[in-house]
Image (tube, grey):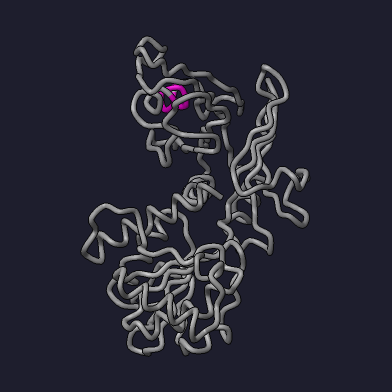
């Protein structure tokens, strides 16, 4: 949803209607889950996805043909069968069923303000896109925060890390909430070849990256346009500039085993939820020994260290390593 908001806002500012389609129910084996969204624009183009293939083609067709701009705004939900025997209504073989909600988003003043606010910096605690659905009535879109909101208030317990739909009846009245902010950061220690490939790869899948290095010629924001921040600092005193929280990820890919040790010495006992380092088995065995003998870390803390890093796909180049490491963090995030 985060990537859709600027394009939806641009269309609204042009005075155009946008059809927002969202998956609100998913059963069995389906290509996309609750909260997946696709916007269909006035020129017939679309952005985002609700599953690809036949289901996406059908959703686009419905959006274009049943919700023209010259008719009053409306909302409705369609169910689609993705039968595993190929006999479902879309002749797909995924297996399972999916329900897609359609709503016309028109450029009225309130909607424009809502989407403009959604582009701003989220307050502490995050931001959520909320859609209150009622049969035979336009869907009510609002922006929610842990403290207050921009529109009708949604109960705080509904504002979770995952998208969710609370169904009230068989007419699909209910509330859909989609988180717009990713909690935590990926702290990349080392701004070399691997670090430069990690930032764009991870940013594209929604991770907020911070790069740390002690070399001015490497800790340069120009090399990391997708990073949220680039820090020039001392590896022996990371805490001066960073305070880890449980939602954070730490990836250590420095140029030197001594700097790896310094980074891990401070990150492993911290609150960071994930701490990993790149290196050979021999190198990591030596670093683990130093962490125990010199830094005095107990076995339970050292056991938090993830090494080797990444999904094991035989990656060798910095580009391949970035794919492997990004895949692992996606897996960790999904497990959370």
Q: Measured along the vertical axis of the image, is residue 43 above or below residue 244?
A: above
Residue positioned 27% across, 74% down in the render: 193
Q: Which of 295 and 257 is in front in this view?
A: 295
Horizontal side of residue 76 vs 197, given as left or right: right
Residue positioned 63% across, 46% down in the render: 129
Residue 6: x %, y % from top left:
50, 52
Residue 127: x %, y % from top left:
64, 54
- Magenta part mainly helix, strand or loop? helix
Q: Give the range drawn in magenta.
A: 59-64
Residue 25: x %, y % from top left:
57, 27
Q: Is residue 269 magenta?
A: no
Q: Is residue 60 magenta?
A: yes
Residue positioned 49% across, 50% down in the render: 10
- Whether residue 118 appears in this view of the structure is yes
Q: Measured along the vertical axis of the image, is residue 16 above or below residue 127?
A: above
Residue positioned 50% across, 38% down in the render: 36
């Amino acid at each position: 949803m985060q990537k859709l908001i600027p394009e939806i806002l641009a269309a609204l500012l042009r005075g155009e209607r946008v059809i927002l389609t969202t998956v609100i129910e998913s059963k069995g084996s389906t290509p996309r889950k609750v909260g997946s969204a696709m916007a269909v624009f006035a020129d017939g183009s679309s952005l985002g996805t609700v599953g690809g293939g036949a289901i996406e083609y059908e959703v686009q067709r419905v959006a274009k043909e049943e919700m023209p701009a010259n008719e009053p705004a409306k909302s409705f939900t369609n169910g689609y069968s993705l039968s595993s025997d190929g006999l479902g209504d879309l002749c797909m073989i995924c297996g399972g069923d999916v329900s897609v909600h359609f709503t016309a988003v028109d450029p009225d003043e309130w909607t424009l303000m809502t989407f403009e606010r959604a582009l701003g910096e989220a307050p502490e605690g995050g931001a959520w896109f909320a859609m209150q659905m009622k049969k035979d009535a336009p869907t009510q879109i609002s922006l929610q925060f842990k403290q207050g909101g921009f529109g009708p208030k949604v109960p705080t317990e509904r504002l979770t890390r995952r998208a969710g739909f609370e169904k009230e009846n068989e007419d699909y009245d209910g509330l859909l909430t989609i988180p717009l902010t990713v909690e935590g950061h990926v702290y990349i220690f080392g701004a070399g070849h691997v670090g430069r490939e990690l930032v764009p790869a991870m940013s594209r899948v929604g991770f907020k990256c911070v790069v740390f290095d002690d070399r001015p010629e490497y800790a340069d924001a120009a090399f990391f346009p997708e990073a949220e921040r680039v820090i020039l600092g001392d590896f022996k005193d990371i805490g001066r500039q960073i305070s880890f929280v449980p939602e954070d990820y730490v990836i250590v890919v420095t140029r030197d085993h001594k700097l790896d040790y310094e980074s891990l010495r401070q990150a492993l006992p911290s609150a960071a939820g994930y701490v990993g380092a790149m290196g050979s088995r021999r190198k990591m065995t030596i670093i683990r020994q130093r962490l125990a003998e010199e830094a005095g870390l107990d076995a339970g803390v050292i056991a938090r260290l993830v090494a080797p890093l990444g999904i094991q796909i035989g990656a060798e180049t910095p580009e391949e390593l970035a794919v492997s490491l990004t895949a692992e963090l996606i897996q960790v995030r999904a497990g959370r």
